[in-house]
Structures are given as C-alpha cells and as structure tokens.
C-alpha cells in the first residue's frame, strides 16, 4: 500500500467529495478516484459509498480511517523530525479552539509563532468543547484549547483560571448588587449556552446543588449578551467573554468564587511543530502575565 492512497482516502473523508480531495491534494479527480479504487481492491472491501448528498464512509471505511490517520500523523512527524535534524523548521500545526480564546489570544500567539517559525503552517479549527476534544483524540487536529476535565487519553496542559461571573441587565432588580447567591440564581430565568459549550456552568450547578430555571439555550456569546441586555434573563459567563460588554449590562460576583480552567489538550508524543506551538503559547501568555493556574 502506498502513502498516496491513504492521503487520497483521508482527503475525500475530510472534504466530502472527490472534487474537494483533488483540490486539497492538487491532483485530478480521476487520480483521486483511481487511488481510492486501488486501495479498496487491495483491502478487499469498499471504503466509501456515494449518495445524493455526497460521499460517506462505509462501516469498514470507518474502521480503516483510524489507522489511516495514525499512519499519516506518524509520517508527518517523521518528516518534521528529519527536517529538525537537518536544521530546518517545517511542518503543519492544526489547532482547535473556542470563541474567546480565538478572539483574545490566538491572533497574537499565531503572529508570534509565524514570525519565529515561518516554515511551519498553522491551520485553525473552531468548535465547541466536545468537537475540539474529539478531533484531538482522533488526530484530526494536533492540539486544542479546552476546559477541564477532559478525557484521560489526552494530556491537559493548564494555562489559566478564568473566573465565572453573573451578568444581568441594568433594569434587573439586582443590578446594583455586588454578588448573587446560588438560591437567587435558582429563582431567575437563565440563559444558558448549549450543552457542548457550557460544561463549566453545569459543573458549578452540580457542585452547589443548583436547580436552574433555564429559559433559553444558545451557543453564541453575543446572542447570550444581547438577550441579557434586553432583560430576558440572567446568565453565567467566563470573565474572558466579557471584555466588551455593553454599558447596560451589570456584572455580579457569584456567592463563591468559581472558575473554568483553560488549557491545551494534546496527545502523547507531540510532533516537533506542535511542541514548538505549545512552547509559543506559554511564552506569549507569560510575557503578558496571563498564565494563571
């Protein structure tokens, strides 16, 4: 089996089409189709099936994909190690992130990283916590910004304690208060992030035996802020998401200090390029006195 067949198979899965795979690998569509057919013939079963809405993995294809990803990751690591031996900085780093880190940290970290390692390509993937964790676990991305806890199969590199706060409209009866109690939270209509975006809030509720009155669930920070602004409910948000909130939103401390713990999730045996990115993250956060764990 040759590597180009694995690359073609992986590219089809990533892009969802032969055309997309051809574009990713700078090959013709017929070359991609031939590589897939050759791989299927050699394995003795179909990997992909074609439907009206695109190309999908067969059950056997799903089983093979894990091994193909591992082979391609190891091949990329080998190339990076060889380049390092020869004194060349090269490779690709695929980074998963969520909104507040993407907005407040990553533009500056990536700029520093690219200035230091211009030969290393950075690819960015944004998603919710569950998606980022899954993609690090499967090797689709090399590292991901996440909040703890995460699966034990990944290593969690701590970066920052991000304080959790309550936000409410300046028309709310509690707007002049400094603090809100957990009992008061239970009586208020609550605007929650969707489940895969808000595990740190669920941890607070579970730890303090809070039974929230959830009125709305949305995934976008700005949507949550707009709903609070219009006095549709209160919300619990990490401090990092509140840097540019409108003047008519008030921020209250929780009865007890609570935090989300932000870190980088990585698999054991990081590639040289990923290790350099991790070092760059710690360096930039340290320079700006943002490391806190």
Image (cartoon, helix red, strand yellow):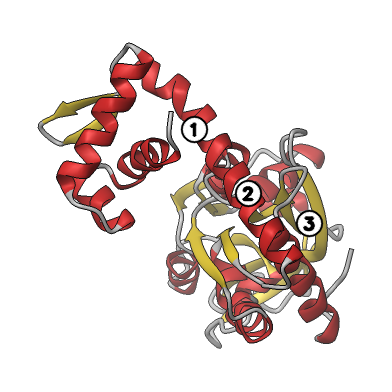
Residue occupying image coordinates x 32% and y 54%: 25
Element marked by disc 2:
helix
Q: Which residue is mark 3?
A: 261
Element marked by disc 1:
helix
Instruction: Give the CA distance from mark 3 to mark 1.
Output: 33 Å
Instruction: Give the CA distance from mark 2 to mark 1.
Output: 52 Å
Q: Is residue 165 above or below residue 108?
A: above
Residues at circles 3 and 1 in contact by the CB criterion of under 8 Å: no
Residue 27, located in which quarter of the rendered image?
Answer: bottom left
Q: Tell me, yes or no, if residue 118 can be seen here.
A: yes
Q: Which residue is mark 2?
A: 187
Q: Position of residue 26 (x, y in %)?
A: 28, 59
| Callout 3 crowding tier (Cα within 10 Å): few <14, some 14–19, many ≥20 | some
- In this view, the residue in front, 56 or 36, is 36
Residue occupying image coordinates x 66% and y 72%: 89
Counting labels gives 3
Q: Position of residue 164 (x, y in %)?
A: 74, 62
Label located before the other in sequence (2 or 1): 1
Which of discs 2 and 1 lies nearer the camera? The answer is 1
For the N terminus, the image quarter is: top left
Q: Position of residue 195 (x, y in %)?
A: 54, 42
Q: Which residue is mark 1?
A: 68
């Amino acid at each position: 089996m040759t590597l180009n067949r694995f690359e073609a198979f992986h590219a089809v899965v990533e892009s969802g089409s032969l055309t997309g795979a051809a574009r990713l690998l700078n090959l013709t569509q017929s070359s991609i189709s031939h590589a897939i057919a050759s791989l299927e013939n050699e394995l003795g079963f179909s990997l992909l099936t074609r439907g009206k809405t695109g190309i999908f993995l067969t059950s056997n294809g799903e089983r093979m994909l894990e091994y193909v990803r591992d082979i391609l990751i190891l091949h990329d690591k080998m190339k990076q190690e060889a380049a390092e031996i020869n004194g060349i900085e090269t490779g690709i780093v695929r980074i998963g992130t969520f909104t507040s880190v993407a907005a407040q940290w990553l533009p500056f970290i990536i700029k520093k990283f690219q200035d230091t390692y211009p030969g290393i390509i950075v690819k960015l993937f944004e998603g919710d916590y569950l998606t980022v964790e899954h993609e690090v676990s499967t090797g689709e991305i090399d590292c991901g910004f996440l909040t703890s806890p995460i699966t034990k199969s990944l290593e969690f590199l701590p970066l920052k304690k991000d304080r959790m706060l309550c936000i409410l409209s300046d028309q709310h009866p509690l707007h002049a208060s400094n603090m809100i109690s957990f009992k008061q939270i239970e009586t208020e209509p609550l605007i929650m992030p969707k489940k895969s975006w808000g595990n740190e809030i669920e941890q607070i509720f579970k730890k303090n035996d809070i039974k929230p009155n959830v009125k709305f669930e949305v995934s976008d920070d700005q949507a949550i802020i707009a709903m609070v602004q219009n006095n549709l409910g209160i919300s619990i948000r990490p401090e990092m998401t509140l840097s540019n909130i409108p003047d008519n939103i008030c921020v209250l401390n929780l009865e007890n200090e609570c935090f989300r713990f932000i870190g980088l999730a990585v698999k054991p045996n990081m590639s040289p390029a990923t290790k350099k990115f991790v070092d760059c993250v710690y360096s930039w956060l340290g320079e700006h006195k943002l490391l806190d764990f």
